[in-house]
Image (cartoon, grey):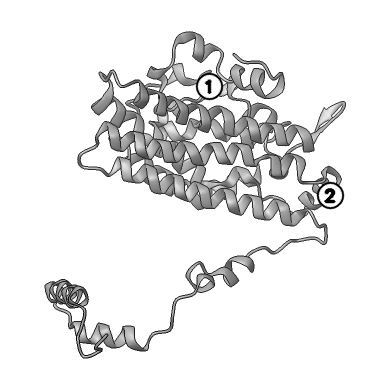
Amino acid sequence: MDRSEIDPKILEQIRKLEEKYEAMGQDLSSYLDGLLYSDYLTYWDYIHLDTLLSLQNPKTGLQDEMTFIIYHQHTELFFKLVLWELEQMTSSENLTEEFAIEKLDRVNRIFRLLSDSFAIMIKGMDKEQFLKFRMSLLPASGFQSAQYRIIEITSTCLYNLIDVRDREMFNSNEPIEELIKHIYWKEGATELSSGKKTLTLKMFEEKYMHLFIHRAKNYQSKNLNQLYQDHFSGTDNKELKEAFREFDYLANVSWPLAHYKSAVKHLHKAPSDIAATGGTNWQKYLPPKFQKIMFFPDLWSDKEKEEWGKRWLLEEVFQKSH
């Protein structure tokens, strides 16, 4: 090949690059100089592998603490990806059924992975080691996952996030600041004996409550449940409805009960249960049958609401199809 001749495809690409940078008032030649002198990109630099692998810092010498740390970091990364997908839905100017199904399918795939991956905590961590190293973590707790709370607030209105036993005392039109005082998860971080807020909850609210209130206000008219009501409430698209229902079930039944299964394995000790890390009331907080939190309550029958969480127990604990 005569190197004096430039491939027409390359010339066309250069022309398009000139147009791109001219539109931004930039000089293409300067960017080409940067490309000429820059190093090749490597996999380890692109994903910041060295930094990523330096972020595990156990507090004890117990080996299974590494499992505990990595699992929670993995969870938070996937929560970030869930929010990435949900925010594309809620910010869409022309939300179609096809787009909603695509995004929900992605979210559901992530939540299925998260629920299944709890086996790493249930079967891949020694109970006696956990009961020792957990004492070095106080008052930190997985309860303090702000991203999961943001997923909830992005998915439905605050009224639907109030414990079903208390919901009749409020209405959905009350101020955000009032509704959030009664959000269901606060009960999960109260002292079992006194009913007072644990230090875990106090620290969590101090750091994130302003963010939760801002998020709830910003998403009051565009949370996922509201978008469903505005765009799809009259649809006959069974695939779309099932995608919304599956997300609801995965986030509010499968995920918390997988967590509950892990808590039972590591925190149950006859004749009583051990308080979770940070003193959270896991026995009342994790089982969905108590709070009956649903992002999309209109998509469930009265019987399904009444038996919320029962299917999981039949399938996962008793290996029976519902």
Q: Is residue 122 above or below residue 228?
A: below
Residue 114 visible (yes or no): yes
Q: Mark 1 packing: few (<14 Cα in 10 Å), some, or many (20+)?
A: many
Question: CA–CA distance between discs 2 and 1?
Answer: 33 Å
Residue at (38, 18) in percent of width and height: 298
Q: Mark 2 packing: few (<14 Cα in 10 Å), some, or many (20+)?
A: some
Q: Which mark is residue 292?
A: 1
The quadrant in which residue 307 appears is top right
Camera-side residue of 146 and 67: 67
Position of residue 172 in the picture relative to residue 231 (left or right): right
Q: Amino acid at mark 2?
A: Gln
Residue at (60, 37) in percent of width and height: 115
Q: Nearer the viewer, mark 2 or mark 1?
A: 2
* Residue 286 percent location from the top left of the image: 63, 30
Label 1 sits on a secondary structure element that is loop
Question: Which residue bears the numbered disc 2?
Answer: 129
Residue 274 visible (yes or no): no
Camera-side residue of 119 and 163: 119
Camera-side residue of 34 and 36: 36
Position of residue 234 in the picture relative to residue 61 (left or right): left
Residue at the limit of the structure toward the top, as seen here: 303
Q: Is residue 29 above or below residue 299?
A: below
The quadrant the N terminus occupies is bottom left
Residue at (63, 50) in percent of width and height: 72
